[in-house]
Image (cartoon, helix red, strand yellow):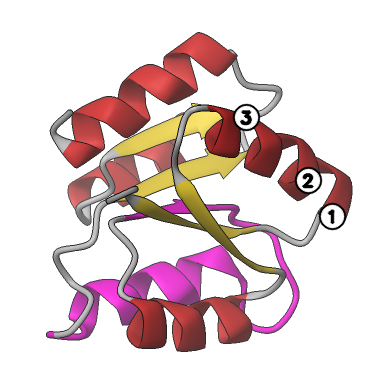
C-alpha cells in the first residue's frame, strides 16, 4: 500500500509540481491549501508524513505544527518543513519541537526525497 503524504501549502503551482514528483515516486498524495484545512485532513486521513509550509493563510504553519504535535491522534506523524524562510533560529525552534527536517525553497529534489524516505523509515 502506498504511503500517504499530506502537502500543506498555499502555492497551487508549487503543490502541483510537488504532487507530480511524489506520485511519480509511488506515494499517495493529499493536499490542503491552508492550516485549517490541513488540520482537518491530518486528523481525518492520518497521513504517514506531512510536508508543511510556514507562511500560509488561516493560522499558518507555526500554529498548525503546534496543534499537530499536541494532539494524541497526530503527534507521531513526521513533519518536514518546506519553506522559503531561511532563518536558522526558526529552523532550530522547529527542530527542537520535533520537526523531522527543515528544507528551504527552492529545494533540491534529491534532498527532499531522501528526507521523505528517512522520515518514513524506507
- Identify the disc placed on residue 16: 2
Inspect this view and state whether residue 84 appears: no
Range covered by the magenta-colored residues: 49-72
Element carrying mark 2? helix
Horizontal side, residue 15 vs residue 96: left or right: right
- In-image side of 34 versus 68 (left or right): right
Q: Earlier in the sequence, mark 2 or mark 3?
A: 2
Q: Does 118 appear in magenta? A: no
User: How far apart are the alpha carbons under marks 2 and 3?
Assistant: 9 Å
Task: Mark yes or no: residue 10 visible.
Answer: yes
Residue beneath disc 3: 21
Residue 121: percent from left, percent from top: 13, 34
- Tell me whether the residue at label 2 lies in contact with that at label 1, contact meaning CB atoms closer than 8 angstroms: yes
Label 1–label 3 contact, CB within 8 A: no
Quarter where residue 16 is shown: top right
Instruction: From the viewer's perspective, tell me whether residue 109 is left or right of residue 34.
Output: left
Residue 17 image offset from top left, x and y in percent: 76, 36
Q: Which mark is residue 57?
A: none
Density class for disc 2 (Cα within 10 Å; few <14, some 14-19, many ≥20) is: few
Q: Residue drawn 87% across and 45% down? A: 13
* The quadrant where residue 21 appears: top right
Horizontal side of residue 82 vs 102, given as left or right: right
> Residue shown at 23%/61% (left/top)?
77
Q: Which mark is residue 12?
A: 1
In the rendered view, tell whether residue 67 sits above or below residue 82: below
- Frontmost of labels 1 and 3 is 3
Is residue 64 part of the magenta span, yes or no?
Answer: yes
Residue displayed at 84% across by 55% down: 12
Q: Quadrant of the C terminus?
A: top left
Question: Depth check: 71 or 119 in front?
Answer: 119
> Spatial distance from mark 2 to mark 1, Cα to Cα?
6 Å
The residue at 35%/18% (across/down) is 114
Amino acid at each position: 500500500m502506498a504511503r500517504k503524504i499530506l502537502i500543506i501549502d498555499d502555492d497551487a503551482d508549487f503543490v502541483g509540481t510537488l504532487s507530480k514528483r511524489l506520485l511519480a515516486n509511488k506515494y499517495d498524495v493529499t493536499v490542503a491549501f491552508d492550516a485549517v484545512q490541513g488540520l482537518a485532513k491530518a486528523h481525518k486521513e492520518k497521513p504517514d508524513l506531512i510536508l508543511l509550509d510556514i507562511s500560509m493563510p488561516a493560522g499558518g504553519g507555526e500554529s498548525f505544527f503546534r496543534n499537530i504535535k499536541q494532539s494524541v491522534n497526530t503527534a507521531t506523524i513526521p513533519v518536514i518543513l518546506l519553506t522559503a524562510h531561511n532563518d536558522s533560529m526558526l529552523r532550530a525552534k522547529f527542530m527542537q519541537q520535533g520537526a523531522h527536517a527543515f528544507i528551504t525553497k527552492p529545494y533540491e529534489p534529491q534532498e527532499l526525497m531522501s528526507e521523505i524516505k528517512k522520515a518514513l523509515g524506507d
